Amino acid sequence: MSKRNRNKSSAPPAAGAGKTCSFLRSPEADSLIVNQPEDSVELFLECRECGRKGRYRVGGVTLDPALVLRPSNDPRSFDAAVGFTGYFVCRQCGSYGPWNLTTHALLVVSAMLAAGHGKAPFFMGQQQLYDGTVIRYAAEGVAILTARIAADPTNAFLHDRLGNLFEVCGLLDRAAIEWTKALELDPNLPTAMHSVAQVHVKANQPREAAALFHRLLDRLRTDSSIPLEDRRRLARSGLEYLVGIHNDSGGEIPLMNLPPIGDSSALTTEFKSATLELRSFDLEREEDWLRMVDTLLGLGSQPVSGAGRGRKGKVPFARAHHDRSRR
Ligand SMILES: [Zn+2]
C-alpha cells in the first residue's frame, strides 16, 4: 500500500490478509471468500480515476451475466460487468474503481469465463450489500458502509455488516474489530455474537467462545422476533461449534449452559428435551441436526418421557447431563 494512498480508513492490516479462515463458516459470507493468497487472482488493471496501471490481487472475479450478455458497441461494456471480491484500492490515487481491464486482464478473465462458473475464484453474479445495493468491488462496499457508519456511528447492525464484508475480503482482523464493536453497541445482536464467538475459536479461546455461543443459543431460544430462518441457521452453527469445543475439551467445557444441580426448575421442558437429544443424536444425520435445532428453539418438537410442555415436567436426564464429563 503506497504512502500516497489517501483511503486510510480502509487500509487493510498487515497481518489480516491471506490468513486461513477455514474455521469461518459465516452464513453471510457464502462462497465468495477468497482469502488464500494463492487463490486470489492477480490482474493488470488500469485505474479509470487516475489512468495509472498496476498489478493487483483482486480476490475472486465476479461477472454480471445481465451485463455481459447485453449486446453493445461500447468497448468498455465487458469491463462494466466485471467485479472483484478482494479488498484493494489504487496505489496511486486511493480509488476503489472503476477499473479498466488491460489486454492482460481481459485474457485472464476470458479464460476464467471459458473454464466456467463454479471454478473458484470465478463467480457468475452480482455482489450486494445487506440492503440490496449492488457493488462491483469489495472496496466500494467498504467505502459505502464506512460512510453510513460515519453518519450513524452507534449503529451495531452497520458495524456487524462491515465486519461480514471484511470477512468476505479475507481481512479477518478488520472483521473482528467491526464485529466486536457491534457487540459492544448491542450485546444481544445474534449475528455479532456468532461472529465474535468464531473469533474466539480462532484465537484458541474455547471458554470465551463457548460462553458466547451459550448466550447466543439463549437469545435464539427466547427472542421470537428474530426471523425463524436466522434462528435456525445461527443455532445450527452455534451447536456445531459447541459440539466441537465440548469434544476438544474432553467434556470439560459443557455443551449446554445449564444452571447448577438443584436449580433445574429454571429450565423449560423444551430445553431439557434438547439436552437429552444432544446426548443421543447422530452427528452424521442431517435430520437429527434439524430436529435438535428445532427442539432447542422450542419449535414443534415432541416432548420426551411424557414430561409435557409445562415447566414442572419430570427431569429424568438432568443428573445424567451433569455426570457427562465423568463418562
Ligand atoms: Zn488511481
Image: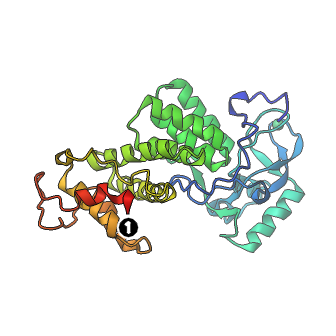
Judge from the rendering whether residue 167 lies leftward or rightward of residue 281; answer left or right: right
Could you tell me which residue is drawn at 83 percent across and 54 percent down?
A: 43
Give residue 125's quadrant in the image.
bottom right
User: What residue occupies the far front of the structure in this picture?
Assistant: 326
Left or right: residue 302 versus residue 252 is left
What colour scheme has been applied to the protein in the rendered image?
rainbow
Give how far across and how far down residue 17 sits, in percent.
73, 45
Three-letter code for the amino acid on which mark 1 is drawn = Trp
Ligand 1 located in image quadrant: top right
- Asked if residue 160 can be seen in this view, the reply is yes
Q: Nearer the viewer, residue 205 or 251?
A: 251
**Residue ID for mark 1:** 289
Numbered circles on residues, count: 1
Q: Nearer the viewer, residue 100 or 27?
A: 27
> In this image, 39 relative to 306: left or right?
right
In front here: 317 or 312?
317
Residue at horizontal 19 percent and vertical 51 percent from the top: 268
Q: Which quadrant is the N terminus positioned in? A: top right
Could you tell me if residue 224 is visible in this image?
A: no
Identified at 33% across, 44% down, the residue is 219
Q: Is residue 17 above or below residue 42?
A: above
Q: Position of residue 206 (x, y in %)?
A: 51, 47
The crowd level at tag 1 (other Cα within 10 Å; few <14, some 14-19, many 20+) is some
